[in-house]
Image (spheres, grey):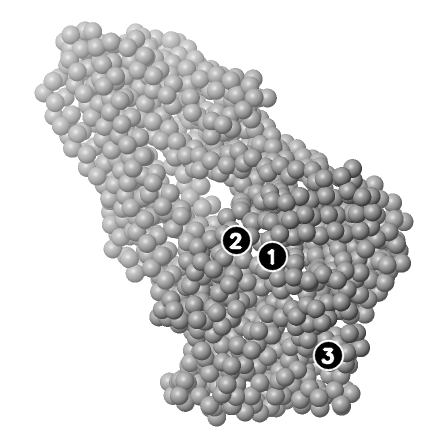
Amino acid sequence: MLKLLKYLRGYRRESITGPLFKLTEAVFELIIPLVIASMIDTGIAGKDIGYILWMGLIMILLGVLGLLCSLTAQYFAAKAAAGFGTKLRNDLMEQINRFSYTELDRMGTAALITGITNDTHQVQTSVNLALRLFLRAPFIVVGAVIMAFTVHPGLAVIFVLLVPVLCIAVFGIMFLGLPVFRKVQSKLSEVLLIVRENLTGARVVRSFAREDDENKNFRERNNQLKELQLRAGKVSGLLGPISIILVNAAVLLVLWSGSTEVESGNLTQGQLVALLNYMMQILAALVAFAFLIMSITKGFGAAARVVQILEVEPTIIPEPGNHKEIHNSTVVELKNISFAYAGAKLNALRGISLRISRGQTVGIIGGTGAGKSTLIQLITGFYPVKEGKIWVNTKKIGVVPQQAVLFAGTVRENMRWGKADAQDEEIWNAMEAAQAKKFIEDKGEGLDFLLTGGGKNLSGGQRQRLTIARALVGEPELLIMDDSVSALDAFTERKVRESLKTKAKRLTVLLISQRVKTIMNADILIVMEEGKIIGAGSHEELIGTCPVYEEICGSQLSGERREVTS
Amino acid sequence: MRKEQSGLAVRRLWKYVSVHKRFLYGSFLFSLLSVILTLYTPILIGQAVDYAVRKGEVDFKNLGRTIVILAAVMMTAAVCQWAVTLCNNKLAYLTVRHIRNDAFWHLLILPLKTLDERPHGEYINRIINDVDRMSDGLLMGFSQLFTGIITIAGTLFFMLRINAPITLLVVIITPVSLFAANYIAKKTYHMFRLQSEIQGEITGFIEEMVGNQKVVKAFGYEERSQKRFEELNHKFGNHMLKATFYSSVTNPATRFVNGLVAASAAILGAVMVIKGRISVGQLSGILSYANQYTKPFNEISGVITELQNAFASASRVFALMDLIPEKPDSPDCFTLTGENTSGSVTLEHVSFSYTEGKRWMEDINFEGLPGQRIAVVGPTGCGKTTLIHLLMRFYEIGGGEIRISGKPIDKITKSSLRRAYGMVLQDTWLKCASVAENISYGKPEAVRTEIIRAAKLAHAHYFIERLPEGYDTMISESGGNLSAGQKQLLCIARVMLALPPMLLLDEATSSIDTRTEIRIQKALVQMMKGRTSFIAAHRLSTIKEADIILVMKDGRIAERGTHSELIEKKGFYAELFCED
């Protein structure tokens, strides 16, 4: 939490003056018992109605001043807290934008989203509360004790004794309660997890007829939750009664010794009433303080999570080697690349060497987990290369990711992801090449057609064509397609392939697929298995030399076609 | 209408609460005691003050007696207050546990059709958040509504006993505080609505961008995303400032009105003391009453909103529990076991409709012999998945009859019917548990060697070994740490271990490459000897070797036969096959 305090820096004025105004309000509140005391001792004793009215007026005046002070304080606190949250969110977003795939894998996007939304909100609420109330309670307590001294030093000793005892009681109960509250929270998320699992997995649960076990499991957790809630309630329920008993014990002490002092003439009746009032103010302040601490500690957990995101050192991806070191006709070259994901035992890539020349179409094929996607993610620089060397001879790389993700907004906005200042004509050209022109034209609104979040108002195949177009808008020199035609029918797929060939002769294409037909006509086919390249060459060359490739072909192509091509 | 519903919800809630009636009575009794005793203390303190008038005029004997009474009263009040809390907690948490258990069980017996009709978030929201809000509401309601009412009544009573005019003054000024609080609440509500609108917008943006951060990176969109975010965030900050400020005005404002009440009571009271109508001690009593008189009003208005929310939540939870569950098994139901299941499947004139009166699937007739491999193909939305759901009795047939091993499926216990199939679906579902626990989900008693054997058969052993902790690796929620193909292999291993007499594969291998798929199918074929299997797929190359292929179109079986028969026929199947 303290590490986040720097986000208040731009609001130093608000963060300091806010609490100061709050303190001023507290001073006014502390004066009131004195006013009432003199009302009793001077006004009533002297039967002076004018004086009583005068004192009443002072009370109202103090109230008005207090209201003004506290409104100012609240405004400053709100301003500082809102500013704090805004700045923190901006920085978090910037940090997330700096993350490489390694950090994104490790932290998970869900945790990042919670961090920048809920967690930040909670921290901000805590800051607001702290600015408003944190200083107030200690000040009232100390102030009330001091006032008691001005009224009667002897009796004030009771106050001095009471305050530490009360503090120990209030904070002791709180610290006993906090771990239980935390347990309640985590138990509740366990319960939530079970509910969610049983919804998403309803078919599986029922197909194995495990309903009774799932129900038993849920009842068990739910019962544990109830027990924890009761335990938390028992502890926190002590707070009220115990502090009341303590304060009232002190009240009795003040009453008894106060009366002795009244008897000997060292204390007036009004002063006795004032002392009792101060006692009540201390009680109210401490109880409020305990609740404040409780809600601020909720913010501590959130703050820790936010700090965790901010403190991650993003992996620096070293610039790949460039054209000075390799021949101009080479677009990508890899030498002896090995790679393991963070936390994985075994290498995902093992000793990969590969050269891709300008204008070539290269197809990569292989089973699940063969390392195809890993390979292209190294080429695009999303993960750092630790073993081996990589050269990339162009900055203009267009990527079509495996999942056809589009964003809420117009088609034009989505297409400009590839090139921020793309003109409509460029966009239409790219869409034509990707076979996406016609169905968007049919929508009537053209490039202004609004996509809903994730592009859910289009079919899977339409989305995929748009993601291909998006990659083409930047007029890339190297186009990387990660299994990105899987949702297209055979006809459309062929049209896309043909138009890529004719549109840009110099375009280098790197194509991943599990379908032989998609990559069969590439200049070079690369067959991967378990992180290694186990075959490279044209379709004709591989048939007869690469048994794995033959097996893949055998599983996908009908007999006649295999013969024709081989 | 809405009022009626919430009235109904209250009555049903009462049914749950009344099980624990004794805690409710305890709560009432103890709050009554604690409130009366608490209110009595200012009077006693006032009396004590009156015994200490001035120098030489202190009545120690009476003072001592009052102090002893005070001590007893305070102690009892504190103990009662604790007892109230305990009773309320018991009452609220027991009730809520009961409701949550019932609601969860209801989820387990709801038809899948009903579950699919709404987003899952809605069910989760009801069982978690709505029930939570109910417990908060109940707790606050029990603890503050009753106490608040007694406190107001008691305060008025005690004040009246001291002095009527001052009481009247306090009663007249108090509504000002209520009006102020109300006005602020309205203003705040408006501000909060504006804030939550823009908050929704910004959360949507974050979910879209950060959720797809890899795409953002792939296009170097980071700077543009940052810029758009900062614009939204700036707007958000401004709205938040206003909403936060307005909401924090309530406390100072009511404190101010309270101060006004206290000042007026003090002036009038002091004059009364001079006139000899009340004593100084009574004045201090009146002042402490006046100070806390408005508090229960504010609390009660808070409680009423909270209770309204709780009742609204309760009616949402009860609406969930009112959804019609699956038909229970009739008592004369037959239980399928490995021994008495031959694996024959017969469909006779089966029809099905999603919406009442609109028949979608009609007159499906089919006879599957034990041990046959039956492929179901057709374009997306032709009814493949529906057919499988009907076989599993996830959906109820609209007409006709389905017989398994000669028994109509509505005469077979649902659990034994479903366990008779090994099902692998396109959406892979894994539990948040270890890899081993997931594989043994269908056979919890399986030992590690059996689990490994099943994993090997499903070609999952190789990648499981490479996971950080092998078979003990915990699978994160929704299997985020595995690829789609790996998840599917685990689902297949799960079926391999359970070894059911029949198999249902719905696009099971769509996320696995064809080579692995062929290997798995080799293993499946071996396992399927003597077992009937249904394979639904849109990729035709995977179903060529089936004994019989059913070609579906618009909820009907358009063609049937073996691969070569259907190709020769040059019909719908041949067309589909060429396109692939």
Which quarter of the image is occupied by the C terminus of chain B? bottom right
What is the C-alpha distance between the residues marked 3 and 1? 28 Å
Residues marked 3 and 1 touching at CB (< 8 Å): no
- Give the residue displayed 82% in from the left and 62% down from the top: A497
Q: Rounded to the nearest whole Å, what is the CA distance between mark 3 and mark 2?
A: 36 Å
Q: Are marks 2 and 1 in contact (CB under 8 Å)?
A: yes
Q: Earlier in the sequence, mark 3 or mark 2?
A: 2
Residue on which disc 1 sits? A531
Instruction: Classify B11 as above or below B212.
Output: below
Q: Could you say where residue A256 lies in the image, as x and y percent from the top left? A: 16, 18
Which residue, as the protein is rendered here, is positioned at the far left? B61
Residue type at tag 2: Leu
The amino acid type found where label 1 is placed reads Gly
Q: Nearer the viewer, mark 3 or mark 1?
A: 1
Query: CB atoms at circles 3 and 2 under 8 Å apart?
Result: no
What crowding class fits label 1: few (fewer than 14 Cα within 10 Å), some (14-19), or many (20 or more)?
many
In depth, the one of A257 and A289 nearer the eye is A289
Q: Mark yes or no: residue A278 visible.
A: yes
Provide the residue designation for mark 3. Answer: A558
Task: Report the side of B67 relative to B320 (left or right).
Answer: left
The residue at the point 54 percent across, 63 percent down is B487
- Could you say which quadrant of the image residue A266 lies in? top left
The residue indicated by pointer 2 is A346
Q: Position of residue A28 (x, y in %)?
A: 42, 15
| Residue under the point 43% across and 60% down | B471
Q: Which of these two is toward me, A32 or B527?
A: B527
